[in-house]
Amino acid sequence: MSTLLQQLANGVVQGALIALIALGYTMVYGIIQLINFAHGEVFMVGAYGGLATYTWLVPDSVKDVWYVSLPLVLIGGVAVSVAVALVMERFAYRPLRNAPRLAPLITALGVSVFLQEFVRNFYPNATAALPFPGVFVQGQLVLGPIRVGYSGILLIFVSVILSVLLQTYINRSRMGRAMRATAQDPDTAKLMGVNPDRVIVLTFVLGAVLAGVAGVLFGTYLNNINTDMGFQTGIFAFTAAVLGGVGSIRGAVVGAFIIGLVKSLAGQYMPGGTQYDYVWIFVMLILVLVFRPQGLFGEPERVRA
Amino acid sequence: MRKHSVKSAAIVVGVLLVAGACGTNKTEAGGSGGACDTSKGTLVIGVIAPQSGGLSALGLGIKNSSQLAVDEANEKCTVKGYKLAVDTQDDEANPAKGAQAATKLSSDPNVVGVVGTLNSSVAQTVQPILLQKKIVQVSPANTNPTLTRGADFATAPKRAFDTYFRVCATDELQGPFAANYLVTKAGKKKIAIITDGKTYGEGLAAEFTKQATKNGATIVATAKIGEKDTDFASAITAISGAAPDALYYGGEYPQAAPLSKQMKSSGLNIPLMGGDGIYDDKYISLGGGDGDLATSVGAPTEKLDSAKAFVDAYAKKGYKDAYGAYGAFSYDAANAIIGSLATALNGGDWSESKRADLLKAVGSYSGTGATGGIKFDEYGDSTNKVLTVYQVTGGKWNAAETGEFTG
């Protein structure tokens, strides 16, 4: 029983991480119908940005004071991932906005590879895994049979709060309304006075902020980052977004937590152990898509007139 | 509008090309043999090892040590009439890339031998390619016994690859040696085993299990993790239910280190013991803690008298990376090839027909190197069966016990 509870806790932490990244995937798809494969790399770049901030910008005297260094590292990481996302949108995706759907897809793959190799070659010592400082309270919270690291709890909190904030922003604010309008019908939205470029840039920025935060918190949780992590976690996040219904914020978060839980529980209880946890995630994805192709919260594809 | 996007595209393409051109494969010539006669040309010693990725620390040490051996040979004019060079190919610890690297090296007629590989899984794809071109291969680090003696290595050994030799001991000695230490000396009777599913880790864990159960320990839990996993919470929860008092890990340090750290911080405060795959300073910097153990092939390089010359020469060259666990072995492997080449050529010219002579010379090579005596048995295995147990104390690896596994 305690193993089950512990694995549930592990799954929730995993899910929280994936949710932050899945939100970026789902938002960009909702607005411009592009699966931004490079979003996982934005997450990775955020982590490396945070590490760089810690190594070179945070003064030694405050390095151990977590409530000073953690915000600084977060700001650094987010700044880097937002910068990368802006450059990516401006130079790789905007020129292809009216091109056939395949072109931006391949470009996204190309940007993903480019970012991975760029960091691997130019960040000092990034050819192997790098230790990431634990910029949060170290140690574990013990609730009966469950132990969760404080960094893990932070991850869950931040993930839930940011998702709620994002949902509120999109539902209540003017820009949020503009985003929803562009997602529903970009041409009519333009007629209504919505500037599509601004909306798309905002979408990318919001996604990048979430991914940057995820990157830094992932580093703090596991104390270890490498250039591969974007691809690995990106696969889960993309799957979560599809599972929940691409384009739906709620779907991305729910999908992410489901994926996290399945990964944990399948690793424990299914034959093959943790080596086959990926298999069960994709089995579940296939089952959901067979019976509900639009995902859990998505809307069925409407053919635009 | 059009001009703008063309310019942007050109910038992106240009940057991509520059990034792509910064590869890690380099051909470096040996030292300037000023007084040597190098009129007949250059002969190449290939090196196949990970130069990038998680295990690059070990692979760079292998490359540098081989380069050192080649530089010294050039200064001493060991191979008359020829200059020696090193051609390093990055296999990224990936069997498919290793096969590509081997194919590239084997297409060069000047490649006389290869020092490599690091990973047993990569060796499996490299061996047949080099065998086809009869290029001699001496590994400084492969420990899986099937590479020299076939699938039935314990009961019906059969030499599969005549071109393959190694200078280090094998896992069928390393696993039991570890078991003897962990069970008998350290008194751990309830052991959990985690492996990464690769050739090396699985083989090593299997050999360990055999001896550990013979010594009276019970294997209370096993788990497997994926090669690219970074979060081991699931695996740790899976084994902690059985309350083990030690963990034996079959795999390498990029995963062993975070595994050890996560295990200890999740309350399972038991030592992690592994094989030569985790014995590197990076293990400690990535999360390995005090009390963790590892076995490695050979006696500690710093303690051997025969290694002093190697350690001093390596330091003098000022390489950026340490020689690592396999530096001394690579140095000896390269020297075995160079020495045999000198014998086989005997002042003559190199040609394809000399490959058979070179193979024979390597098989009967006998010398003293940085790791002690270098000699190969009829299967290509080294006669040097020394192993050492290391323990992390005070944030550093320290030798705990050196010996041989005798049964």
Image (cartoon, coloured by chain):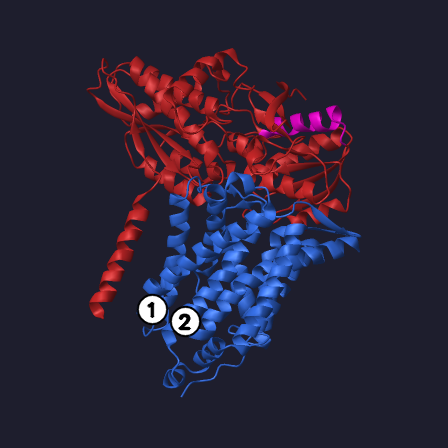
Find residue B304 and report its horizontal and vertical position in percent.
53, 14
Residue A171 has which mark? none
Quarter of the figure that contains the N terminus of chain A: bottom right
Is B227 in front, or is B61?
Answer: B61
Q: Contact (CB < 8 A) between labels 1 and 2?
A: yes
Residue at (48% x, 78% y) in the render: A174
Q: Is residue B344 left or right of residue A81?
A: left
Badge 1 amino acid: Arg
Colour that chain B carries in the picture: red
Colour that chain A carries in the picture: blue
Query: Total of numbered circles in the picture?
Result: 2
Q: Which chain contains the residue that carries disc 2?
A: A
Which SS does the magenta portion mostly show? helix
Image quarter for residue B355? top left
Relative to B348, say whether A141 is above or below.
below
Residue A94 has which mark? 1
Image quarter for residue A250? bottom right
**Residues drawn in magenta:** B171-188
